[in-house]
Image (cartoon, rainbow, N blue to C red):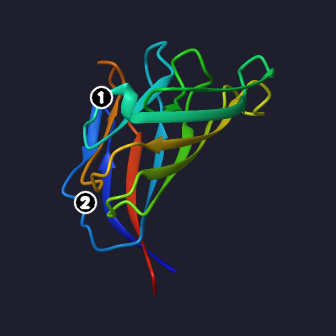
């Protein structure tokens, strides 16, 4: 299997960004996000095909919250990633990887999400989560929108979209 960069976005200074016109000739997609927020909001929402209808998503999660307590659950709703905010140590960015299987088919789409938002240099109070999310429509994925609820991300925030290929 190979990996090809489709697009890289400088997300600093914007509250939302998207990958659009995603080519339909690869196997899977990988999105890598590194972000930091200047406000107290600490999630970055993810919408496939700009679909904000929560009933089209089913998400399960397992993680360690900022109090180092384990939690798990599921909900009907779009997946999200954690991002660092202004109360966290400076120059520390969250990191997230989202793997979307069979994105160009007419089947429901499965996503695997790994997100970590460290709050200090020794990672003692970091949010660490894995999520599994289903997109319950038969539409191929042609765009991926990330939104931070009108709060701009800080300079240095980036997102990259990769195609996973058979070769």
Residue under label 1: 52
Label tally = 2
**Residue 122: percent from left, percent from top:** 78, 33
Task: Answer whether residue 117 is visible to the viewer in this image.
Answer: no
Which of the 4 image quarters holds residue 163?
A: bottom left
Q: In the image shown, does 140 or 45 lie closer to the viewer?
A: 140
Q: Are the residues at dot 1 and dot 2 in contact (C-beta closer than 8 Å)?
A: no
Residue 15 vs residue 94: left or right? Answer: left
Q: Is residue 132 above or below residue 150?
A: below
User: Residue most toward the bottom?
Assistant: 167
Residue 65 vs residue 34: left or right? Answer: right
- Residue at the location (30% across, 27% down)? 15
Q: Is residue 50 above or below residue 72?
A: below
User: Mark 2 Cα within 10 Å, few/some/many (few <14, many 20+)?
Assistant: some
Q: Secondary structure at mark 2?
A: loop
Query: Which of disc 2 and disc 1 is earlier in sequence?
Result: 2
Residue 156 vs residue 42: left or right? Answer: left
Which of the 4 image quarters holds residue 154?
A: top left
- Residue at the location (43% across, 19% down)? 38
**Residue 128: percent from left, percent from top:** 69, 34
Q: Nearer the viewer, mark 1 or mark 2?
A: 1
- Residue at the location (24% across, 54% down)? 142
Q: Is residue 5 above or below residue 100?
A: below
**Residue 12: percent from left, percent from top:** 33, 35
**Residue 130: percent from left, percent from top:** 65, 40
Residue under label 2: 22
Task: Answer whether residue 27 is visible to the viewer in this image.
Answer: yes
Alpha carbon distance from label 1 to label 2: 19 Å
Q: In the image shown, does 160 or 92 lie closer to the viewer?
A: 160
């Amino acid at each position: 299997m190979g990996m090809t960069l489709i697009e890289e976005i400088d997300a600093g200074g914007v509250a939302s960004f998207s990958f659009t016109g995603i080519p339909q000739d690869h196997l899977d997609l990988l999105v890598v996000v590194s972000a930091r927020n200047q406000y107290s909001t600490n999630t970055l929402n993810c919408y496939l095909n700009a679909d904000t209808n929560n009933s089209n998503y089913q998400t399960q999660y397992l993680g360690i919250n900022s109090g180092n307590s384990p939690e798990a659950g599921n909900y009907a709703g779009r997946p999200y990633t954690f991002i660092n905010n202004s109360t966290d140590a400076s120059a520390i960015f969250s990191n997230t990887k989202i793997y979307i299987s069979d994105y160009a088919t007419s089947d429901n789409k499965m996503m695997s999400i790994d997100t970590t938002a460290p709050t200090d240099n020794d990672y003692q109070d970091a949010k660490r989560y894995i999520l599994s999310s289903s997109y319950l429509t038969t539409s191929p994925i042609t765009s991926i929108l990330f939104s931070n609820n009108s709060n701009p991300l800080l300079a240095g925030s980036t997102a990259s979209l990769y195609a996973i290929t058979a070769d």
